[in-house]
Image (cartoon, rainbow, N blue to C red):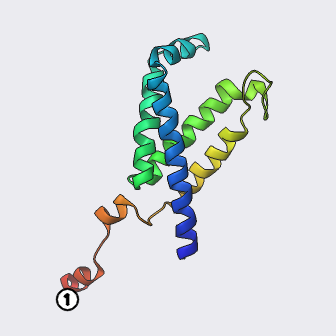
Amino acid sequence: MFKSELGALLLRVTLGALFFIHGLVKFQGGIENIVGWFESIGLPGFMAYGIALIELIGGAALVIGLGTRLVSALFALLMIGATLKVKLSVGLLGNGQMAGYELDLAFLAIAIYLVINGSKLLSVSQLIFQRDSKNDLTKAA
């Protein structure tokens, strides 16, 4: 049991850190550039802000283990959307000008794993919502 929790922790922190960095770069590099790019591929520009915030806040939440399943579900949806809207046309490994969707698939697989299994080890959610079985037993008596 500990091995699977340790593995889930590694996946959760890695995915969270990578999404946090992606969100941070969107803001540091000029979010207006991302807004323009979204519009150029037929997406509403305002979605760039939402996606960058989901990546930034969601990434931090995953690192500390807050709302792991919910955040991972949002990340899975982002990866499905990115793959279908942007990356599918360039292929699995890309076309020389743009990366392919191989990394998106890896992120998607990790996110789906975390949606299914969660990650309790060293998580804020576990600290907040952990039930004390001793108190449950005394209340029932």
Q: Which residue is mark 1?
A: 141
Q: Position of residue 44 (x, y in %)?
A: 50, 15
Is 19 drawn above or below residue 132 in the view shown? above
Q: Quadrant of residue 77?
A: top right
Tell me the quadrant of the picture where the C terminus can be found.
Answer: bottom left
Horizontally, residue 93 falls left or right of residue 19, namely right
Image side of residue 140 versus residue 121, left or right: left
- Dot 1 falls on a residue whose secondary structure is loop
Residue 2 vertical position relative to residue 100 in the rendered view, above or below: below
- Looking at the image, which is closer to me, 140 or 33? 33
Vertical order, 67 against 121 (above or below): above
Quadrant placement of the N terminus: bottom right
Residue appearing at x 47%, y 53% in the figure: 69
Q: Is residue 4 above or below residue 54?
A: below
Judge by depth and name the residue closer to the eye, 52 or 129. 52
Q: Which residue sits at x=67%, y=46%?
A: 106
Please tell me which residue is depicted at 44% across the width and 18% down the height of the picture. Answer: 46
Task: Count numbered badges in the picture.
Answer: 1
Q: Amino acid at mark 1?
A: Ala
Residue at the bottom extreme? 141
Q: Position of residue 61 (x, y in %)?
A: 40, 48
Could you classify mark 1 by the number of other residues whose Cα lies within 10 Å: few (under 14), some (14-19), or many (20 or more)? few
Within the image, what quadrant is residue 18 found in? top right
Image coords of residue 2 (percent x, y):
53, 75
